[in-house]
Image (spheres, helix red, strand yellow):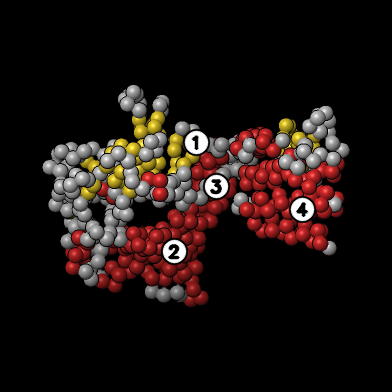
Amino acid sequence: MSGYPNAKNRKWIFAFQAQFRIFLITLIPPQVVWRQNNKYPGLKEDFQYDNLDRLDGVSMGGNMTLDMAYNSDKGCITHVVDATNNSVVAEYSYDSWGRMRNPATWENYTPGSEPAPVIAGRGYTGHEHLPWFNSINMNGRVYDPLIGQFLSPDNYVQTPDFTQGFNRYSYCLNNPLIYTDPDGEFIFSLFLGPLGSILDAACWGAVINGGVYTASVALSNGGFNNWDWGQFGKSLTVGVISGGIGAGAGILTQGLKVYGAIPGALVEGGIQGTAGAISGGFTNIIMNGGWGENGKNFWSGAAQGFATGFILGGISGGVEGYKNAANSQYERNLLFGNLTHNGRRDALRNYIIEYDLWITGMVEFDYFADPSVRGSTEFINPITGEDIGTIYDAAKDFDNGVLSRYHFNSKRISSLRRIESNVLHEKQHMLDYFNGTANKIFNEYGSSALIPILEIRAHMNVLNLGFFRNYNVARIKHWFSKLYY
């Protein structure tokens, strides 16, 4: 097979390279990988995975070749294609249970003769193959594709109303044509996303609390003669509540990056404190047999839960916020997390480079904008190099465009998003003056319409790129009112 037949028609994933690592922007196949050049066999590979331990990308030092990894509908890596010439580097095939087979004949390989997956050892459903043992590491347990079962039993029966659920060694309820087991956890998260993760955690909470109660009874004087089904049920209920609420709090903080020790402590402490209050309040109700007078049982448990959650979450969040500020790309205040003066200037320089303001006729930039504005642009005569008196003169007298000087107010803009949006706003102004658009607007609509139209164009540009919708919509409405009334 000389090439992947539909490679030109497949939807490609776009990737960007940062600090010599490759990150994927989307989750659809094919995936971007880097293949080591055979001339440099000693180079080390650097693999990235997503939160389900599936391959995201590979980065290598030295001479590299860009490959695309294609997946089946179940996440099995089936083709590795050289993106430079569209030729197939490797092709794999698996039967329904994960056993590798010849992709041309579909005959199963003899155990031990299977080709080694070239992409970080990943193959069936994106999991790690263990060729020395003819097994597959599926995170939670090790799976044997020859017999189609796990080597160890599941800790629980996940579907007691379904006969296949009682075989705790089975893979995906003995139905691999439909299901996969991405992480070895409860089945809920596979179908219900974040809600499923909360249900998983609730189940874990019930199992743990039930186990703790069982152990405590077993070790007590009299052993299981002291068993109380009512107390056991309460333990399970408390486990469900604490596990579910804890998971919900974790989802809220997952991926949340707060800069600065104080903001980190307040955010994490607030979330964990609120979760602790809800969990503690209802736990107290369950264990004490009711709300109590004026809800006393709930409020006392809520107060204790909030205090515990806020303190522990605050400590954890404060440490994390401090680390985020210290490791930030741009210099930040370690306590409050805001960009320092130097951090804002560095960010501006990087955004100017990223958005290539030089192609819009910008020849200079500085940090000395008028205190009343976040940023502004002055225009320069491209022939003489002298400053042009007003923006009206720059539009009226230069049909072939002018050059520009960007003034930035680093004291008024404190966040990266605002710095970036200001660069994009001023870039539009520079471009309109550089390519002669401002001259055309001036000649066709007159001086009174010049600023409103240019401002509308600049705010529309920033709005279309996803920045500060409410603010930019309000400014567009404002300038429209100036234009027509």
Tag 1's secondary structure? strand
Question: Between disc 2 and disc 3, whose residue precedes?
Answer: 3
Q: Earlier in the sequence, mark 1 or mark 2?
A: 1
In-image side of 49 versus 300 (left or right): left
Residue denoted by label 1: 18
Amino acid of disc 4: Ile
Name the residue located 72 percent from the left edge and 35 percent from the top edge. 362
The mark that comes first in sequence, 4 or 3, is 3
Tag in front: 3 or 1: 1
Residue type marked 2:
Gly
Q: Earlier in the sequence, mark 4 or mark 1?
A: 1
Q: Amino acid at mark 3?
A: Val
State the separation of the CA atoms marked 4 and 3.
38 Å
Say the numbered circle drawn on residue 453. 4
On the image, numbered disc 3 is attached to which residue? Answer: 258
What's the amino acid at mark 1?
Answer: Ala
In the image, residue 50 sits, relative to residue 161, either above or below, namely above
The residue mark sitting in front, 4 or 2, is 4
Q: Nearer the viewer, mark 4 or mark 1?
A: 4
Locate residue 270 relative to residue 123 in the image: left or right. right
Question: Label 4: few (<14), some or many (≥20) within 10 Å?
Answer: some
Quarter occupied by the C terminus: bottom right
Residues under labels 4 and 1: Cα distance?
37 Å
